[in-house]
Amino acid sequence: MDNIILEMRGITKTFPGVKALDNVSFKVREGEIHALVGENGAGKSTLMKVLSGVYPAGTYEGEIHYDSEERRFSTIADSEELGIIIIHQELALVPLLSIAENIFLGNEIADKGVIHWPQTFARTQELLKKVGLTESPATLITDIGVGKQQLVEIAKALSKKVRLLILDEPTASLNENDSDALLKLLMEFRNQGMTSIIISHKLNEIKKVADQITILRDGGTVETLDCHKEDISEDRIIKGMVGRAMEDRYPPREPKIGDTLLEVKNWNVYHQHHRDRQFLHDVSFTVRAGEVVGIAGLMGAGRTETAMSIFGKSWGHKITGEVTMRGQPVDVSTIPRAIKAGLAYVTEDRKQLGLVLINNIKENTTLANLSAVAANGVIDERQERKVAGDYRTKLRIRSHSIYQEAVNLSGGNQQKVVLSKWLFTNPEVLILDEPTRGIDIGAKYEIYTIINQLAAEGKGILMISSEMPELLGTCDRIYVMNEGRIVAELSKEEASQESIMRAIMRSGEKH
Amino acid sequence: MVADTSTHTTKPSIGDYLRNNIREYGLLVALVIIMLFFQFVTSGVLFRPVNITNLVLQNSFIVIMALGMLLIIVAGHIDLSVGSIVAFVGAISAIMLVKWGLPAIVVVPACLVVGGIMGAAQGYWVAYQKIPSFIVTLAGMLVFRGMTYVVLGGRPIGPFPKDFQILSTGFVPDFLYFLNPSPEIIKNMVALVAVLALVGYAIYAGLRNRRINEQHGTENEPFVFFAVQMAVIGVVALFIGFQLSTYRGLPNVLIVMGVLIAAYTFVTTRSTIGRRVYAMGGNEKATKLSGINTERLTFYAFVNMGVLAALAGMIITARLNSATPKAGVGFELDVIAACFIGGASASGGVGKITGAVIGAFIMGVMNNGMSIMGIGIDYQQLIKGLVLLAAVFFDVYNKNKGKG
């Protein structure tokens, strides 16, 4: 167990103008699960790119020792040859190819360029069994869920005789069941002697599986914690990550709850693609002024679909039900009408659905309410600049100016730009779908603070989140969804991780 | 990761500025070099007054269509049918004018409407039925070409009445002749005065813009660049204006073109419609979720393209003084190439009117220059193809370098 398989010594990597890694040291023992944590921008991904040869030897300073020999990788192929396999956060699978084709892509079992299909399928079946999948190797990637896709990535790594598996945020887009399955698999691999490095923001998961934890901050190593020597609490890890003890991850708030703003009654929606399958069943809920209401549930429970179908029928078809604002029925049949009715929907997928990445902060901020900074169809540059500048200051968007392109912002700042866009439409009710997904702890705190401010201004907030602690920490009331139905409504006092899970499980038994 | 930590602003050096904006200056520099090159190898024929007039007349329709095509490309689409629209509109204008004897004042608006309908017919399938524009307009290209043969019965129609020909072969009359200091050299005073006024306004507007930017703390281009750019544009414009004034003055087409360029520059940079088209091309889903009717925008982009193609069709037909079924073959490629040379992105969301116009002029000067040199159409095509590839490679190269 005390065999050091990997040691990185004094790694320094500079980009023009920025020192991304500064004299980082990192040691991994053979056969352990080693967690690498730190805020976004701390240098985790850069370090792993140095290790895997994405940044070739010579573009950084320092030494990499692997298997007690110094290595200088100049391509990814070099590191893969020695069994170092990295699985990136954004999955690198081709959606319209089969599982088998994906696993052996670039590494085909072939004779003079002719693929040996029976052998490919047989090998795939073996690999899938190892990761606990029962799918046929001929299944297309697009037909399986994200959780299973992640497992296919791991199977692909296994096909390459992996010794050191690196997972970059493997559970970021997985629901709790899939995450658990994945972590169990990692532990099983550990028992078989494989070494893994896992990068994650989910501290509870790290606590569950890690043998050692290395914390990075601002491009430097802070410390390495041994989970077997002492009991490491989440607060202990956070303290290392942010450099100070984080007393409370959720800013305090005195709720001042007013009249009912948004009420949705008997909302029934059929599936967008499978047109005769009813997806949402009699969903009803209310959001009051100054209230933060959560929707909990597993992936696929219908939370995003509920939000999007209400917001201008952006999802689904054959939509029936009633939406009222302050007791008056409102028309939400198109997005412009939904906006006019006082709704705003902050998407869970800010890169694909929230931002025009190649446009700058200013242009993204005013996009949903451009006519407010224009007269007779002509944009008033001065006013637009002022609006964007004000939101940049108010939401503390860190950028060099309002002319910075959205693509160059960090996740947290991107999210703030999306929030700016919707705040500028002056909505009464904001639907926030996974507002803190993939952003670091400091930025999360800022987003919670903004949510609190909005509630204090009398806006209604409907928050969808897969992170239960976040819902428990911020919401006044939580609805639980499962399989397209609202299965429970819990007050702040009733709500706990256990009560939410219980509601989900119990509803599962009924159907 | 780089952006995460950069909260402070540093004033960029001139070198940085040049690196970041190399595309725009590069394009202008390329045009000037190409012009000087052909001026040299044609022993000065390129900038003769007659030839400048020809250059304008020959390229006006490419420029006009490039304005519409830029919007289409920025919106994330493509239109292959413009050459066929040119031919069809030319044909029906000939039928209305020559066969039916309708006056130009009726025919011109009628043809613009027809062009709009042709654009709408394609825009419907692209915007509302979500069929890729490449396929829809490929079909349109075949259908409209076929329709041209049908209405013309395979035979050319012409010649046209004078009032229609004015559209492309007319010149702005010299109503300022009394200001003319030396009638032996200068034949048309309006051309000179107009160009002088234009250059003056450009400098005034440029300076005003810089002042406004300064007031709001927005980054200006270094003054050296502004000055050099203004000087180059001013000298070239004054030279061309002078040359034109020694011949027959300003072609009507040039005025039409100038007004359209100004209008479309305004629409793309200042109007809400323009902004929305760019946003849509950058990320259609996010734009739609921001409450923008992306279908309608796409639809009208094609309608607009149809109208501009119809205008171009009439200009060409009037210039050739005959409507033929083969008119406008291959024009779509010149127009699309002009946009891409001008820096438009094939994936949408990026591109400038000024870029497309300069791109069109680069194509035009090369066509004209190579023809004067007596280079065959075969080699002309080869060279133009390589220039297109080089221009786009330059873009990609710069972008990758920027990523570091």
Image (tube, coloured by chain):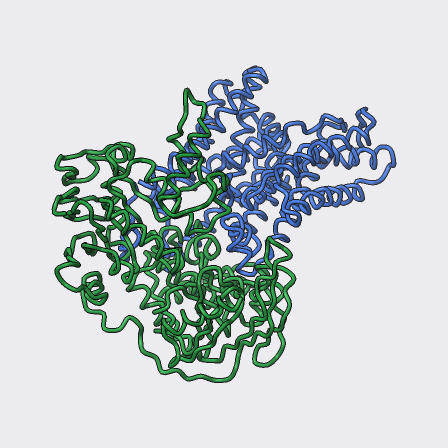
Residue B210 image point, x, y percent: 40, 53
Residue at position x 15%, y 58% in the image: A228
Q: Give A104 or A331, whichever is nearer the viewer.
A: A104
Residue A437: tell me if it is visible. yes
**The quadrant where residue A232 appears:** bottom left
Residue at position x 42%, y 36% in the image: B395
Classify residue A331 as left or right of residue A455.
Answer: right
Classify residue B43 as left or right of residue B251.
Answer: left
Residue at position x 87%, y 36% in the image: B100
Q: Give A312 or A183, whichever is nearer the viewer.
A: A183
Chain B as rendered: colour: blue
Residue B212 image point, x, y percent: 42, 58
Look at the picture and state if A55 lies above or below A225: above
Residue B253 image point, x, y percent: 65, 37
Classify residue A320 as left or right of residue A308.
Answer: right
Look at the picture and state if A432 lies above or below A153: below
Look at the picture and state if B38 lies above or below B143: above
Q: Give A271 or A251, whichever is nearer the viewer.
A: A271
Look at the picture and state if A63 lies above or below A363: above
Residue B32: tell me if it is visible. no
Residue at position x 32%, y 56% in the image: A400
Residue A407 image point, x, y percent: 39, 51
Q: How many marks?
A: 0
Q: Give A479 or B68, whichever is nearer the viewer.
A: A479
Chain A as rendered: colour: green
